Amino acid sequence: MTVLAVVLILAVLAVVYAVAIYNNLVQLRENVKNGWSQIDVQLKRRHDLIPNLVETAKGYMGHEKGTLENVIKARQQAINADNIKDKQAAENFLTGTLRSLFAVSENYPNLKADTQMRQLHEELVSTENKITFARQYYNDEVNRLNTSVQSFPDKIIADVFKFEKRDFFEMEDNSEKKAPAVKF
């Protein structure tokens, strides 16, 4: 009878421990989803600023049509990307086209002095900073989830309930890890 009681107590403890691990994995997964949501909100804000930026620049940069079209094309690709890998690539391309727009705009003193352009630039820099913070939070949560999914004994529960590692949201090259720096 005592052996049966000990076995029963151990079984109950094992189930309670498994439930605790499962609940922790659920919380980590939801934190990752929340982190991605925060990135998405900031990326949408960035995407919403770009048409205003291009319209403001158009008036001054009429013969730089290719640069402006590339920014709009890059924005559309970023909006249409539907998974993390595609979103990463599209956002990297968008960052590059924005840099080229700001580099070309340096040749237009009237554009640099334009109040609306300066405000848009400030909003874009602020948004880039928010994207950076959101990416950092997301990547921290992905790291926690990935560590748990690969660590024993959590791995057993993760495998049973099909919790999977997630991809980090990373920039492709070090020069792209900085917000566009423009002097207006």
Image (spheres, rainbow, N blue to C red):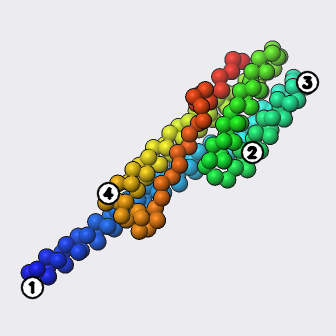
Question: Which residue is disc 2 drawn over?
Answer: 77
The residues bearing labels 4 and 2 have C-alpha atoms spaced at a distance of 40 Å
Q: Is residue 52 visible?
A: no
Question: Which residue is disc 1 drawn over?
Answer: 1
Q: Is residue 104 left or right of residue 122?
A: right
Give the residue furthest to the left: 2
Judge depth for marks 4 and 2 and give the one in front: 4
Please report the residue visible at 37 percent of the width from the left and 65 percent of the height from the top: 157
Please report the residue visible at 75 percent of the width from the left and 45 percent of the height from the top: 77
Q: Earlier in the sequence, mark 3 or mark 4?
A: 3
Q: Residues within 10 Å of mark 1 (few under 14, many from 20)?
A: few
Residue 152 image label: 4
Percent x, y of residue 137: 49, 43
Q: Earlier in the sequence, mark 4 or mark 1?
A: 1
Q: Earlier in the sequence, mark 2 or mark 3?
A: 3
The residues bearing labels 3 and 4 have C-alpha atoms spaced at a distance of 61 Å
Q: Earlier in the sequence, mark 4 or mark 2?
A: 2
Q: Earlier in the sequence, mark 2 or mark 1?
A: 1
What amino acid is at disc 2?
Gln
Give the quadrant of the C terminus.
Answer: top right
